[in-house]
Amino acid sequence: MNSSSLVSKVIVVGGGIFGVSSAVHLTRLGVQTILVNDGPLASGASGRSLAWLNSSRKRSDEYHRLRMAGIDRYRTLAAKYPDVAWLRFDGGLTWDADDDANEIAAVFRYERDIGYDAQLLSADEIAAVTPGVDKRSVTPQGAVFNPGEGWVDLPSLIDILSQEFLERGGTLVTDAGLAMVMVENGRATGVTLASGITFEADAVLLATGANVPGTAAETGHFIPDGTPIALLVRTKPTQLPLRAVLNTPRVAIRPTPTGALVLDSAWSEEEVIVRPGGIYKVKDSTVARLLEEASKVLDGNPKLELDTYFVGPKPIPGDGEPVFGQLNDIARYYIAFSHSGATLGLIAGELLAGEIASGQLNPLLETFRPGRFG
Ligand SMILES: Cc1cc2nc3c(=O)[nH]c(=O)nc-3n(C[C@H](O)[C@H](O)[C@H](O)COP(=O)(O)OP(=O)(O)OC[C@H]3O[C@@H](n4cnc5c(N)ncnc54)[C@H](O)[C@@H]3O)c2cc1C
């Protein structure tokens, strides 16, 4: 790896949160940056994310540290935009099913021991802490409330960041079809668009969400891929009092900037029918049941009406941990591929931009490099 030289021009491929965040951070560092995307910005996973900002439950120390830095950057952003409807820190409430796998007490102890702000609440205690929850749906083991958690509306954030990117002189190319990274003599040299137009650059960042492993494989790099096809349901505006992000055994819920709710769950994801050619079918019964499950955990059990739903890949590396950094043997070819891209979006963009611009490796990304797969 050529770690000492500086770059002056970078192409970022992918207009999701990782691409846009990296691109704006590159322009903040004074690097001439072109951001290309196949369709409009935020048309991939970032446009249909639950986007709960958290580091809840147990994970590797390194991953926890990175997520906490991610939340820290959102805190800074929230201080800059204190009253916006698209970024809220109203906490998260989690409970498990009433079965042998319920680990809510252990989760609480673990979080408390590592200094992650957590309260173990009985069903009766919840209303005094956070509104809008039907206490009858909370299992006898109780729930963990994490006051430091929040949520972000990623399309709104991407809009704000892309405006700054343009103001700082970045070049935005959207609706350009699939771009291909050019590699010559063991180095990324630029990108070719579907139209045949090429852009040359000193470095390329591939932040194409679920497409990253396939593209990396074309260069002989194996990135294990655990990407499922995910479903996100949005209700019509409800104006319910719910503020926290809810993670419950049958449904996860968060408010939206317009007073609606978005919902997802593991079981509804598994019910999506995946047909050849990237065609996904969502059963009406799945959507109806998810709306019912959400109603059950909300105070007053309101009837929730479907506004729309979104279905598509949720980028997840095979080992569950982020993949950020330069490919092992192709100089200046960087990739960003991770789950929890809402939580990590700002920090990953900042750190990747720093590494690309300076060639200096950041220790926070040390365990997440693509080279770990050999
Ligand atoms: C249902 C759901 C729930 C989630 N919940 C959470 C959560 O609670 N908390 C959390 O932190 N994260 C969550 N995530 C994860 C988070 O949303 C993603 O990790 C993040 O949005 C991924 O961003 P990205 O930039 O990698 O990819 P994307 O947003 O998919 O962006 C990639 C872009 O690249 C484009 N592209 C692909 N190939 C090419 C090409 N060759 N040329 C040009 N453009 C290309 C795509 O069209 C897309 O626009 C969730 C995701 C989903 C789907």
Image (cartoon, rainbow, N blue to C red):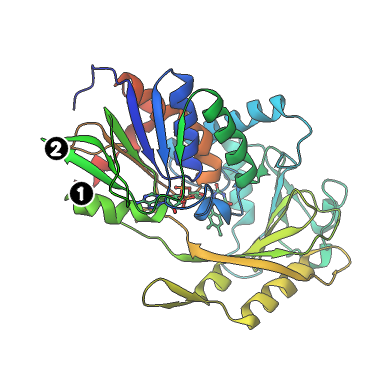
- Look at 40% across and 33% down and name the residue there: 34
- Look at 60% across and 39% down and name the residue there: 159
- Crowding at dot 2, Cα within 10 Å, few <14 / some 14-19 / many 20+, comes out as few
Q: Are marks 1 and 2 in contact (CB under 8 Å)?
A: no
In the figure, is residue 243 to the left or right of 315?
Answer: right
Disc 1 from disc 2: Cα separation: 16 Å
Q: Secondary structure under badge 2? A: strand
Residue 221, how many percent across, how many down? 20, 49
Along the line of sight, the residue nearer the viewer: 90 or 229:
229
Residue 340, how many percent across, how many down? 51, 47
In the figure, is residue 125 to the left or right of 140?
Answer: right
Q: What residue is disc 2 on?
A: 184
Residue 51, how many percent across, how many down? 60, 49
- Sequence-first disc among 1 and 2: 2
In the figure, is residue 259 to the left or right of 360?
Answer: right
Q: Quadrant of residue 181?
A: top left
Amino acid type at image mark 2: Glu
In the figure, is residue 23 to the left or right of 73?
Answer: left
Along the line of sight, the residue nearer the viewer: 178 or 251:
178
Q: Quadrant of residue 354?
A: top left
In the image as oriented, which residue stretches furthest toward the left? 185
Identify the image quadrant of the N terminus.
Answer: top left
Q: What residue is disc 1 on?
A: 221
- Look at 37% across and 53% down and name the residue there: 317
Residue 310, how many percent across, how many down? 58, 65
Q: Secondary structure under badge 1? A: loop
